[in-house]
Amino acid sequence: APKNGTKSDILFEKIKEFILCINIAMKSASMFATLTAILGFLPLAPAFLTPVPSATMVSPSALEMTKLTYGSKAKDFKPGSPLKTAVKQLGVKVKYSCNKGDCATCQVSLGGRFTKPCVAKVPEEPRLKSLQEKGLEIRG
C-alpha cells in the first residue's frame, strides 16, 4: 500500500489484496471470515459469513417451544408433549371422565379452538408473531 496515498488509494490496494487472497485461498466460509478480519474488511463481509458472538446465539430448543397462557400465567411447552400435563402445570382445573377423548368432559378452548386435553398434544408454535409473544390462551 502506498505510504503517502489517500484513503481511497489505500482502500483500493486493500481490496486488490483481498481479491487476490480470495482467488488463491478461498476454501470455506470460515476462511473467508478469517481473511476479511485480517484485512480489516469485516464490515464488508456478507452478514451470513461473519462470526456471531455466542452470547447472541439462541439455542435450538428455545426456538421449538410453544407458549401457553391461562389467566396471568404463561409457560413454554415442547410441541408434541401431552396437553394434559401442560394444562395441569398452568393450574387449569379440568374434569376427566373417560381419558380416551370420547366424552368431551375435559374439553378446553386452546387458542379459540376446542380441544380435549386427555388425548391432545401441545401444538406447534403459532406463525403469527403476536401469538408467539402472547401465547395461545387456554380457557377451561
Image (cartoon, grey):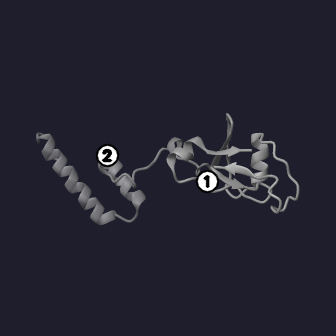
For the question of whether residue 3 can be seen, the reply is no
Q: In what quadrant of the picture does the C terminus appear?
A: top right
| Left or right for 108, reference 9 | right
Marks 2/1: CA distance? 31 Å
Of the image marks 2 and 1, the number of the one nearer the N terminus = 2
Circle 1 sits in a helix, a strand or a loop, which is it?
A: loop
Q: Dot 2: few (<14), some (14–19), or many (≥20) neighbours within 10 Å?
A: few
Residue drawn where x is 16% and y is 50% of the image? 12
Q: Residue furthest right?
A: 97
Left or right, 42 with respect to 58, comes to: left
Q: Which mark is residue 64?
A: 1
Circle on res. 76: none
Q: Is residue 123 above or below residue 68?
A: below
What residue lies at 73% left-to-right and 50% top-to-bottom? Answer: 108
Residue beneath label 2, please?
43
The residue lying at 14 percent from left, 44 percent from top is: 8
Q: Amino acid at mark 2?
A: Pro
Callout 1 environment at 10 Å: few (<14), some (14 to 19), or many (20+)?
Answer: some
Residue type highlighted by circle 1: Glu
State whether residue 104 appears in this view. Answer: yes
Q: Residue at x 20, y 56 (%)?
A: 16
Q: Of 20 and 88, which appears nearest the observer?
A: 88
